[in-house]
Image (tube, rainbow, N blue to C red):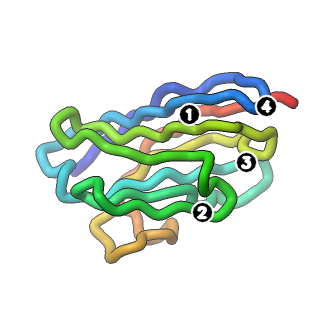
């Protein structure tokens, strides 16, 4: 069992940056690939990025490639999402998730555990 708690969301102007964190409980954190998804009002939850269990492999949605960076610290059971050059269309609730699925895990149904989400709002 893995419990996930996101933090770091907030309001930022376009072009700004935010860093999201996801703290995980459970001794098996390092055996899971981790992902970030986001859901804007009226839209389906969409894949943003994922990182393999060692941290050496990452995968990004085209919409965030070059602007967002995912990383993890297995010693601290934490995964991070550094978001730069933010755009109004990045506004959404961001969710952290964990999966034991094959790589790359880009589908919602591939993830076993989810956090409660953190709101990111980018003003124009």
- Tell me if label 1 and label 3 are in contact, CB under 8 Å: no
Q: Is residue 52 left or right of residue 21?
A: left
Residue 110 in which image quadrant = bottom left
Q: Is residue 17 left or right of residue 35?
A: right
| Of callouts 3 and 4, the N-terminal one | 4
Residue at the (51%, 71%) spot, across then down = 107
Of tags 1 and 2, the one toward the viewer is 2
Distance between the Cα atoms at labels 4 and 1? Answer: 18 Å
* Residue 41: % across, % down: 77, 46
Residue at the (42%, 70%) spot, across then down = 105
Determine which residue is flagged by label 2.
Answer: 61
Determine which residue is flagged by label 3.
Answer: 40
Determine which residue is flagged by label 4.
Answer: 14
The image's mark for residue 118 is 1
| Of callouts 1 and 3, the N-terminal one | 3
* Residue 53: % across, % down: 25, 58
Foreground pick, 43 / 18: 18
How many C-alpha atoms fall within 10 Å of the one at disc 4: few (<14), some, or many (≥20)? some
| Of callouts 4 and 1, the N-terminal one | 4
């Amino acid at each position: 069992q893995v419990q996930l708690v996101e933090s770091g969301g907030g309001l930022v102007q376009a072009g700004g940056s935010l860093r999201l964190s996801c703290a995980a409980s459970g001794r098996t954190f390092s055996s899971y690939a981790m992902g970030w998804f986001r859901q804007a009002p009226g839209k389906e939850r969409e894949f943003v990025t994922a990182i393999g269990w060692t941290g050496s492999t990452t995968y990004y949605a085209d919409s965030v490639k070059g602007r967002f960076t995912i990383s993890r610290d297995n010693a601290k059971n934490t995964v991070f999402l550094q978001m730069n050059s933010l755009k109004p269309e990045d506004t959404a609730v961001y969710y952290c998730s964990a999966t034991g699925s094959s790589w790359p895990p880009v589908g919602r149904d591939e993830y076993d555990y989810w956090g409660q989400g953190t709101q990111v709002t980018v003003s124009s």
